[in-house]
Amino acid sequence: MQDGAVRIQLAAAPHKGQSNAALCAYLADAAGVRPSAVRVGRGSSGARKLVEVDGPPAAVAAALVARLGPLAETT
């Protein structure tokens, strides 16, 4: 957690949406949802992004905390 956001570093190149696709795939796997349920809502061309995940909020949050650790937990 850094400045109220989860920080994720990717190895994918920021070219033609490759890093956005890698981020969405990673978060889909971590949240236990299908890849099409995750999308970049804002910031697709910048380093800071708002990512939207479809699914029951409590279940998605619990899966992300389990995968990313308690620092991903929101208060």
Image: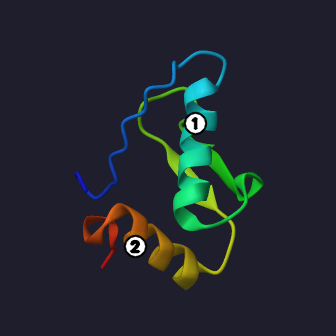
Q: Residues within 10 Å of mark 2 (few under 14, many from 20)?
A: some
Find numbered disc 2 in the image and state the secondary structure of the residue it sits on: helix
Point 69% across, 67% down: residue: 54
Point 51% across, 25% down: residue: 12
Point 59% across, 15% down: residue: 15
Residue 71 is left or right of residue 14, and the answer is: left
- Check the picture and name the quadrant holding the C terminus: bottom left
Q: Residue 66: which numbered mark, if any? A: 2
Judging depth in this view, the residue of 35 and 3 nearest the camera is 35
Residue 67 is left or right of residue 71, and the answer is: right
- Amino acid tagged 1: Ala
Question: Which image quadrant for residue 59?
Answer: bottom right
Measure how far apart labels 2 and 1 are at the Cα level: 20 Å
Query: Residue extending furthest right?
Result: 36
Judging depth in this view, the residue of 22 and 16 nearest the camera is 22
N-terminal-most mark, 2 or 1: 1
Residue 9, given in percent of the width and then of the height, sits at 36, 36
- Check the picture and name the quadrant holding the N terminus: bottom left
Point 54% across, 41% down: residue: 23
Question: Which image quadrant for residue 65?
Answer: bottom left
Query: Residue extending furthest top?
Result: 15
Judging depth in this view, the residue of 3 and 37 nearest the camera is 37
Residue located beneath label 1 in the image: 22
Q: Residues within 10 Å of mark 1 (few under 14, many from 20)?
A: some
